[in-house]
Amino acid sequence: QDKLGTDSFRFFGLGGSNEVGRSCHILQYKGKTVMLDAGVHPAHQGIASLPFYDEFDLSKVDVLLISHFHLDHAASLPFVMQRTNFQGRVFMTHPTKAIYRWLLSDFVKVTNIGNDSSAGGDENLYTDEDLAESFDRIETVDYHSTIDVNGIKFTAYHAGHVLGAAMFQVEIAGLRILFTGDYSRELDRHLNSAEVPSLPSDILIVESTFGTATHEPRISKERKFTQMVHSTVSKGGRVLLPVFALGRAQEIMLILDEYWSQNAEELGGGQVPIFYASNLARKCMTVFQTYVNMMNDKIRKKFRDSQTNPFIFKNIAYLKNLDEFQDFGPSVMLASPGMLQNGLSRDLLEKWCPDEKNLVLITGYSVEGTMAKFLMLEPETIPAINNPDVTIPRRCQIEEISFAAHVDFRENLEFVEKIGAPNIILVHGESNPMGRLKSALLSNFSSLKGTENEVHVYNPKNCVPVDLEFKGVKIAK
Ligand SMILES: [Zn+2]
């Protein structure tokens, strides 16, 4: 007797289960295999940053779907395509692919610089050539159009979060699975919020980043943010905004550029400059300027009415690196990477953190084990990146206001209820918030317990399968 016959559904997490980072999930049903996302873990380097690819035969994967371009969802894709026995087809949306190319070539550069040959030899996961070769084999999908690959059907829906982000509804032999990736339901300045697919789902795989926490309302959050930045520069301080080069950074820029225009007398005309420091700055802005038609009505209307592209900013200058930056007087600096692991944002942190007038304002989600997370503890000193034995005094202010664009508990619960799936698999959350979310969901659906509509919630660890049997499925005797 085969309890795990081909008629049972299996979920197997290779990364991003009970953690945030290296997202990668395997789905198997009726002999078909789908892989969702292929990320790296931002707190680790080299091979250690990968999902547990050794634990699964990647040659079995028919289709690999990438939800969005963030490194924890896409940065191990060139490794999978070029350095493993993977032979399947890869799909992502058009803006994701456009941004993926620049983002990952920057990732290769940054990780190569960060590699100290004395610290364990060549740890490069892949090269620029691997990236270029993999790029040509990635296929693109439009939102709301269904693709069929040998009986695996899938459709991309808007997920909010960042430009190009998608939720995928996968259908295999009548069984429907919805994967949210990272998603947001709040209407922001430029993105469509996540949508509910018209067809129901049997299984929902949903992120749990913020667990049972509640977000501050958008308006008061923005006000607090602009006031904090304004009061720091008024006192002659510098503001460091560590951001992931692309995605949420553009939302922050829309907020700051508007605020600077409203306070032009005091801040405008270069009196207090705003910089966007990234190797990718100009290339990335071109992608945003190109895909305005995929954004929400608000920003498209602004584009139509003013006849100027909303991503051409009046008050923000681009910096390719810090050599061209003259550090006199107050300024605001958006610099990547967002968790201060290395690169430009880390260099500026080390330069500015000894001065108590300065402010480091964290706007993204900070993963366990990164410098951004460590700073929240307001340490007396931080280790220098070039020599961990050297410590730098930390006197600057540290604040956190999240524009990370993940759902909070209320938004997540409302969405989960709308989807109405009887099986919920939680991913993309640290163990504690994920555990709290599981309890809250179970108690929310407790009235259905023992009925045929009972809702099952799973929070598996990496490499621990979840097996589900469905009614009407015959098990071989
Ligand atoms: Zn993301």
Image: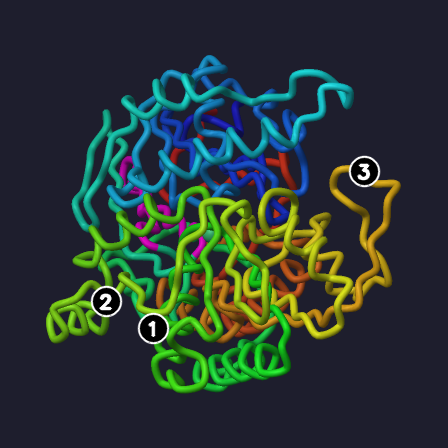
Label 3 element class = loop
Q: Residue at x 38, y 75 (%)?
A: 269
Residue drawn where x is 27% and y is 22% of the image? 136
Mark toward the start of the polypeptide (2 vs 1): 1
Cα gap from disc 2 to disc 3, whole angstroms: 46 Å
Q: Position of residue 317 (x, y in %)?
A: 39, 59
Q: Work out whether 148 lies above or below 231.
A: above
N-terminal of the pair, mark 1 or mark 3, is 1
> Where 63 falls versus 402 (above or below)?
above
Q: What span is in magenta?
A: 163-182
Q: Which residue is mark 1?
A: 187
Does residue 10 appear anywhere in the picture? no
> Residue 195 falls in which quadrant of the image?
bottom left
Q: Amino acid at mark 2?
A: Asn
Front of the two marks 2 and 3: 3
Amino acid tagged 1 = Leu
Residue denoted by label 2: 296
Disc 2 to disc 1, how far (Cα)?
A: 8 Å
Nearer to us of marks 1 and 3 is: 3
Secondary element type, mark 1: loop
Q: Which mark is residue 387?
A: 3
Residue 381 lies, in percent from the top left, at: 85, 58
Mark 2 vs mark 3: which is more N-terminal? 2
Label 1 neighbourhood size at 10 Å, few (<14), some (14-19), many (20+)? some
Are circles 2 and 1 on residues that touch, CB within 8 Å?
A: yes
Q: Residues within 10 Å of mark 3 (few under 14, many from 20)?
A: few
